Image: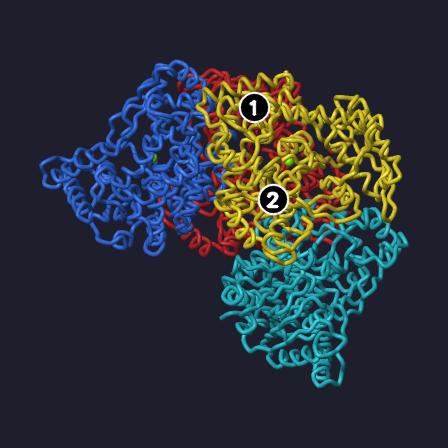
Chain colours: A cyan, B red, C yellow, D blue
Amino acid sequence: MNHSKTEINNIQIAYIGGGSRGWAWGLMSDLALENKLSGTVKLYDIDYRAASKNAEIGNRLSKREDVSGKWNYEAVETIEDALIGSDFVIISILPGTFTEMESDVHLPEEYGIFQPVGDTVGPGGMIRALRTIPIYAGFAEKIRDFAPDAWVINYTNPMTLCTRTLYEVFPEIKAIGCCHEVFGTQKLLASMLEEVKWISNVNRRDIKVNVLGINHFTWIDQASYQGIDLFPLYREFVDRNYEEGFEGSEKNHWMNNHFASAQRVKFDLFRKFGLIAAAGDRHLAEFMPNNWYLKDLQTIQNWKFSLTDVSWRIQNQQKLAAQSDRLVNGKESFEINPTGEEGIDMIKALLGLEELVTNVNMPNHGQMGNIPTNSVVETNAIFGRDSIKPVLAGELPPEINNLVMRHVLNQETTLQAALQQDNEMAFRAFANDPLVNLPPHQAKELFNKMLENTKAYLPV
Amino acid sequence: MNHSKTEINNIQIAYIGGGSRGWAWGLMSDLALENKLSGTVKLYDIDYRAASKNAEIGNRLSKREDVSGKWNYEAVETIEDALIGSDFVIISILPGTFTEMESDVHLPEEYGIFQPVGDTVGPGGMIRALRTIPIYAGFAEKIRDFAPDAWVINYTNPMTLCTRTLYEVFPEIKAIGCCHEVFGTQKLLASMLEEVKWISNVNRRDIKVNVLGINHFTWIDQASYQGIDLFPLYREFVDRNYEEGFEGSEKNHWMNNHFASAQRVKFDLFRKFGLIAAAGDRHLAEFMPNNWYLKDLQTIQNWKFSLTDVSWRIQNQQKLAAQSDRLVNGKESFEINPTGEEGIDMIKALLGLEELVTNVNMPNHGQMGNIPTNSVVETNAIFGRDSIKPVLAGELPPEINNLVMRHVLNQETTLQAALQQDNEMAFRAFANDPLVNLPPHQAKELFNKMLENTKAYLPV
Amino acid sequence: MNHSKTEINNIQIAYIGGGSRGWAWGLMSDLALENKLSGTVKLYDIDYRAASKNAEIGNRLSKREDVSGKWNYEAVETIEDALIGSDFVIISILPGTFTEMESDVHLPEEYGIFQPVGDTVGPGGMIRALRTIPIYAGFAEKIRDFAPDAWVINYTNPMTLCTRTLYEVFPEIKAIGCCHEVFGTQKLLASMLEEVKWISNVNRRDIKVNVLGINHFTWIDQASYQGIDLFPLYREFVDRNYEEGFEGSEKNHWMNNHFASAQRVKFDLFRKFGLIAAAGDRHLAEFMPNNWYLKDLQTIQNWKFSLTDVSWRIQNQQKLAAQSDRLVNGKESFEINPTGEEGIDMIKALLGLEELVTNVNMPNHGQMGNIPTNSVVETNAIFGRDSIKPVLAGELPPEINNLVMRHVLNQETTLQAALQQDNEMAFRAFANDPLVNLPPHQAKELFNKMLENTKAYLPV
Amino acid sequence: MNHSKTEINNIQIAYIGGGSRGWAWGLMSDLALENKLSGTVKLYDIDYRAASKNAEIGNRLSKREDVSGKWNYEAVETIEDALIGSDFVIISILPGTFTEMESDVHLPEEYGIFQPVGDTVGPGGMIRALRTIPIYAGFAEKIRDFAPDAWVINYTNPMTLCTRTLYEVFPEIKAIGCCHEVFGTQKLLASMLEEVKWISNVNRRDIKVNVLGINHFTWIDQASYQGIDLFPLYREFVDRNYEEGFEGSEKNHWMNNHFASAQRVKFDLFRKFGLIAAAGDRHLAEFMPNNWYLKDLQTIQNWKFSLTDVSWRIQNQQKLAAQSDRLVNGKESFEINPTGEEGIDMIKALLGLEELVTNVNMPNHGQMGNIPTNSVVETNAIFGRDSIKPVLAGELPPEINNLVMRHVLNQETTLQAALQQDNEMAFRAFANDPLVNLPPHQAKELFNKMLENTKAYLPV
Ligand SMILES: [Mg+2]
Ligand SMILES: [Mg+2]
Ligand SMILES: [Mg+2]
Ligand SMILES: [Mg+2]
């Protein structure tokens, strides 16, 4: 890297999963908007053609006059090529294909288990983890061997276990997991300020929150805006909107496909537990016992959130593939929009250009009380030059911690089971998931079927 | 106390719950058989008449020629009278009456929740805890004020929370909780030695085990007899008896009314988790998810254990009351039988007469890994003069620890809820119990009914 | 308090030690320069006349046109009057008088022990602690009873033990200890940038450092300026200046009376241990074994730092008393100068007006590894609305941690000794201080003399 | 191994350092007296001839009619030959030769540092550690590769660092360190019972003690004999003997060459700290600051303990070599005496033949509070079949813990320095030892000379 006082050039980013349409295009868009950074992005993907197309799209973009962040995009054929010399590694992959995801999300429905997302916990999240962990173990080894000093930013789910695996295999890795769910809750609080206090256009970054929990099941126990305590306001806001729900804005952003969630789960959790759950309702519902918010389709409809059918994902993917071709051959012009993700801000902070405080997934070294050491937790952290230091977030009230711990311990078991390829151990975690509310023999039957459907991606 | 080289006289024991028939008579029997100790037992009970009758029974016994341990029994009207000057405090009470227990055990059946015992976890155990914790908080204060140096031995359930409450209110207390469930498992291993190895008449004390877990949900991860590793033998034993179960002996002991348990739950847990669960099947089943062993009456019958109807307890109580009268007026002679409990051995060890290693419930100060500090756990400990030091028992495999932790955290929440009289908090623990497999509104309805039924014993 | 969007009025500050000249005048100066805050400062001092004079000086100042921060100053006769209603409590006292300090600093010289400051560790720091801890225990009780929700900012030495005592007596207190020594090291690094890199006018706040240790014995293991790693530069800087030392600027600031320190101790510690010690040399030397930097006067002269004679403090005090009178009667005009302290920034951040990251002394809840829980450590923390959250600073290399731990443990012993008024225990800490390099009987003799000299301030 | 009900045959013991005269002959003696065990001892030594002679001596012994424990002794040429197939590994070596020990013990005298033993801490202990740690790292690798399931019993000093190194290099090792110093203190307490209470012939094993600390600097905070608290008696005993000291028995045992220690250091530590220090005075003095008990020869004489001159060790070694030849050729008959060591009892317990509670050196997993995890501590442990479980010993009072921690942290630094071959780091530990009361440049000079004298045994 070359440092000048205010710009840094020749940065090298390795993008693993660089053939993706959503995340890769988002990165290009954000990089295009940032004039203090430049360098090369090496795109690696098991689908090399997709990575090549993205390189083409990216390089076209860099040539445009309206683009201030000029980057060189290069598709590479091996992960080593991407990693060698990289300052940052971004990982955003689809573990397996939509065929596996179809089984993860929808097969459990035959057993009465509905999953709005199915990529984090629940039967879908667990089976997804079993095929993702070996892939991430491989990434960790490659990073250890070819880019041990690079900062690694992960966007793939299951976020906690992806990040956890990286550290388990290469403990000295400098890796974090990033997710925008907390940002969504900050935006909800900004909307609340408008509704309750007629303060409009509040930037979500000015909503200061203390975050603690695990990814997609994070909680906020302190929130303020310019000296105003937001908790009393939120209580009023929840009371006002509890029955009908609150229809937030930004609902149709491609990266954040929440469909119609009305925040009712979030409001109900606030009433029952007193803290602000800081993820979308579709995620939150999956962490609670099966018969709270996901008992049956009627219950789900009452709570006003949607299930994301994998068939939609497949259709969307086809649409994006067509769009990719149009972007490559210039029939469509790349639309530059800030994603709202913080990846670029993090990179700037890690380069020493600015200080950043935001929430991030990292191994617990004390930032969260009453959670085992090394389990990956989500709290605030301060980013500075080559340094991310978590903030002491405190601890959750015992009843919430209890719910969180059940998943933390299940995830630790899942990690070991995947690394040791011990299906019996994996099943013990599976059977203990709050959504798997089945007698053992039925749970085993479901587990075996799901495992069979993902076996192409399991080590032999 | 007066020490001579081999005997200790003038020991004073305070017996709280001293009007009981089962436990008090058991103590009298064990004291009568022990010739190295003598002194006074002060019997305190909210039913003073029952305590008085027991004093009469005990003093009659001490006069008999065939009795070597001569003790003076005295009923007292206040707990202070019992505590002042005591060297040891034994607590064995019924929290509330059988009316409350009837609700604890049987009301949940209306919601499809069956409980074989209902005094430890599950809806029954939790509601029982809510009324017991305030009573024990009171005991702790009295002990702090009137017998701070005495050793306190608790036999009441819920064992973990009774012991936990004593320490929470008076952290310097010298208290332990004692339970014979592990002894039963040692006896099972002795029976196994006979069946598998034709070694007969093995004393359960010669079965050396490493114990770790929480009361009634303890586990054994090492077991040996004279240099023989018992784990391979147990695996063979389980294989041989898995389908039909193993009918143990001692099944009709009055203090240990297991009725017909065939150890099938224990065998199944061994197959699924690899360790020996060290409590009776009726207890173990209550700690697991509802639809494992307690889904419905047919499931229960298949697993071959019984539910203890409270009506049986009521009848049995009436029989014992009649027997008490006969013992008082001499129409029946007190039958001296060793109970198999270790209270007297513990007292001897604490007086310095012998060294004793046995399992005991105490706050976790590191004896068990991956369990929060101060939560009450059950492990081995060494007893010496005025000293009980837990042994480092290690940690459970993550999947079992996971199951244990759910209860540990629920119990901590229950403790705080009871001490702060916070019913909302108590409900959050209740709804999280593995047996309470209900939608929140039904769980709340059940909770409210059960709470109503125990309200006579809750602080106002 | 009244919040508007950008200003906060009616803030109430209790100033304990409000009769002081240095610190109180500094606060007035800083408040006068800050236009977003206003309210009342209640000045409490055991010397009520001195507090009254300061009130007069402060109110005069508020009337001046060139002053943008308008505050009302009020001398009060009791600490309760100061505390009731306060949002913030500032404590800056002299524990005892200069007579006691004379003994603390100079009596050990008879035993060959030289102390440049004598207020933190060493025989002087320890005896000072013994009389300060009971005073602070009293403050903690008053704050608990009259201002439990106020934020408490302590400036008094021994900083660690003052802050530690507040938390020991009132664990829920919201208190921090503040010291400018790290700022001095940031300024040294800014000077270094000028010397080594010709980058001038760097603001010390832009020197980003990771701080860890205990007050006056803190260390920096990461330092950067706008993406530049300062460690290689510092190594070069030390090599260049090791023999002659580096004469820093700002040496004559009244609040920061370092006299002529040439940073040679700091440079030597860097060479020996590899990290940047982040306090003045006069403080640092006191934490190391006696025969490293303080063996005799010649050694001290070689290392180029001064001993602060208490007679100088007495003279200075007299000068300030005279100046106080001139300020009260208007013969001299109050000179407004920013002190460089961060108290006002902290208050603004705690009110939610801005986010602040700075170093602070707080009980260890995990922010520093390998140091006992609850011992007061100095690390960075994030200040936000009603919230100070320490940053996970990591841990020191074992050899440095070793040196730090000796003082941490000594301080814990001193705390308990002072609270329990156990002079034998206090002596055990005293004899273990690295400067007390004496046979036990001589150490005891010195201890007893010093204790005698401070007895007017010890509880009876 | 072949188990019968009461005997175990075909045990294989690897003896590393099997050419030694003292320890090897002691083992032979103890094995000869034990009729429940038999098997083979493989003697490995870098001096193969010495091992061969010992094999000859051992096999001669086994043939004698008066010997009930019949063992086969075999000298082997490689450590692998000794380890393969072994059930137990005993390590007792001299790291380096007496030439190195001469430098360790006596060179520091030129700098005014006197060391009675010089093998544990102090300059001698540290330099000895630097050459011993690499040897033990090698042992650990061999054990990992050739006897990973064997139990390893170490007798070599520095005990703590030898044991610590084994675990650092092979964390799954089953190793303990054994030392008889605590036994000596139990014997002192037995003698006390005779003097104070006229109770004679008390077996030291019946003196029950709670042990906590690090090897040669262990402490007893509870001691009893058959229900009698020994602390009040010890206080009386110390008062009676403080000035003159107490001349213990057993002073001329070859294995335990204490010469004339009068327990005055132990008595003084009791007066100053309130606990019973549980090692010989010669060891204890080395852990305290230089000017407490070792200031000069006069001070040492006043405290009534001896310095062990290495020249005596050399003479003694020559005598033993001559005796070895006589034993080999039958000119002298081997005298069977129980050593008082517990190695054989430990082996019997680990084989499941008996339960044993005794003190042992193991990594801290919570058995001792306020000491870092994994540092080797000495506490009681329960030995059972293939199992050693430490007892929760509690924690030392802060002032004593402080003294212990200084050595614990120094030892951790020494370990890392030795493994990383980082002499600068090693020096930082050296300069921080309480006996090294020197200015840094003198400390460095001494360190360099001592290191030079041991360089033949350092890795290159
Ligand atoms: Mg996400
Ligand atoms: Mg029980
Ligand atoms: Mg300071
Ligand atoms: Mg020894």
The residue under label 1 is C106
View quadrant of ligand 4: top left
Where residue B127 sits, quadrant-wise, is: top right
Across and down, in percent, residue C29 comes to: 79, 37
Amino acid type of disc 1? His
User: Mark 1, mark 2: which one is toward the viewer?
Assistant: 1
Provide residue C338's location: percent of width, then percent of height. Answer: 75, 41
User: The N terminus of chain A lies in which quarter of the figure?
Assistant: bottom right
Mark positioned earlier in the residue sequence (1 or 2): 1
Q: Chain of mark 1?
A: C
Q: Give the numbered dot on residue C366.
A: 2
Amino acid type, label 2: Gly
Q: Quadrant of residue D284?
A: top left
Report the front residue among B429 and D40: D40
Return the residue found at the far right. A198
Label 2: which secondary element: loop
Chain of the residue under label 2: C
* Residue at point 62%, 44% (across, down): C185
